[in-house]
Amino acid sequence: MPPWSCRAAWWCRPIASIRTIITEPAPRPRGGRPTQQDAPLITGRILDAATTLFLRDGYGATSLEAVAAAAGVSKRTLYARFAGKTALLQIVVGRLVTRWLPPFDAGLEQAAGLEAALLAAARVMLATALVPEALALHRLIIAEIGRFPELGRVLHDSGAGVGLERLTRVLSRAGIADPAWAAEQFMTLVLSVPQRRALGLGRPLDAAAQEDWVVRAVALFLRGVAGQPADTIL
């Protein structure tokens, strides 16, 4: 538990709690008269506007006033739903992560054998990391975490660490030593160079190059963690 523990704050709850906040109808703002059907639509408009502004303009440059204006709601309506800018970003990131996790989970759980699981997971990881929203989020975190250290906590608490935890469990079941360390190394091996190229630091990988990257990265990882050829690890 970090020294700035915020157990009492709703935005520090586990990802399951965040998903509940996303999917349940938002509370009615004082002074407003949204119908029961309108309430989740208003919350959705706010989150859509916040996602666009955060990913386009950055965390520091995005104000709650700008989000309210872009969503076409009053500041009072926005504040009735979200405690502040950090809390709003928490939900925005959690909303993105909930879109990205199901294919990753399916790849890990449905594959027969460790190599097949890692190939499936790596394909999903790479495809997800290279979509515009994920690249914009990565750029936001890298550019602004120095001024806003809370961004690292927001990203982890919003569910970005869930994929790492699930990959760790798969590696542990396969008997890989120090599976948490190995899982982090695997993610770095698969994502770092393609992501950097997609951000403009080199030639981006096309579909064929991405598949070749995945196959070679998985083979290298398995040889490294097991000390034997990849096709002997099942």
Image (cartoon, rainbow, N blue to C red):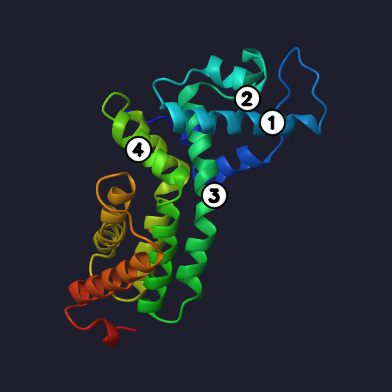
The kind of residue tagged 2 is Arg
| Mark closer to the chain start, 2 or 3 | 2
Give me the disc on residue 26: 1
Q: Earlier in the sequence, mark 2 or mark 4?
A: 2
Q: Name the residue beneath numbered marker 3.
A: 98
Front label number (2 vs 3): 3
Amino acid type shown at disc 4: Arg
Task: Write the residue at 28% across / 48% down.
Answer: 196
Q: Residue furthest bottom?
A: 232
Place of residue 81 in the rendered image (x, y in percent of width and height, measured from the top left)? 62, 24
Q: Secondary structure at mark 1?
A: loop
Q: Is residue 31 left or right of residue 168?
A: right
Quadrant of the snapshot with the N terminus: top left
Compared to 165, does 57 lie above or below? above
Instruction: Specify few, some or many for label 1: CA neighbours under 10 Å numbering under 14, 14-19, or 20 or more.
Output: some
Residue ID at (50%, 56%) = 101
Q: Amino acid at mark 1?
A: Ala
**What x and y, as percent, mark residue 156?**
39, 42
Identify residue for label 4: 139
Q: CA distance from mark 1 to mark 3?
A: 18 Å
What amino acid is labelled 3 in the image?
A: Thr
Q: Can residue 152 be seen by looking at this rendering? A: no
Relative to 145, 134 lies left or right: right
Q: Which residue is mark 2?
A: 81
Task: Tell me whether circle 1 and circle 2 mark residues in contact (CB < 8 Å).
Answer: yes
Residue pictured at 67% horizontal, 20% vertical: 72
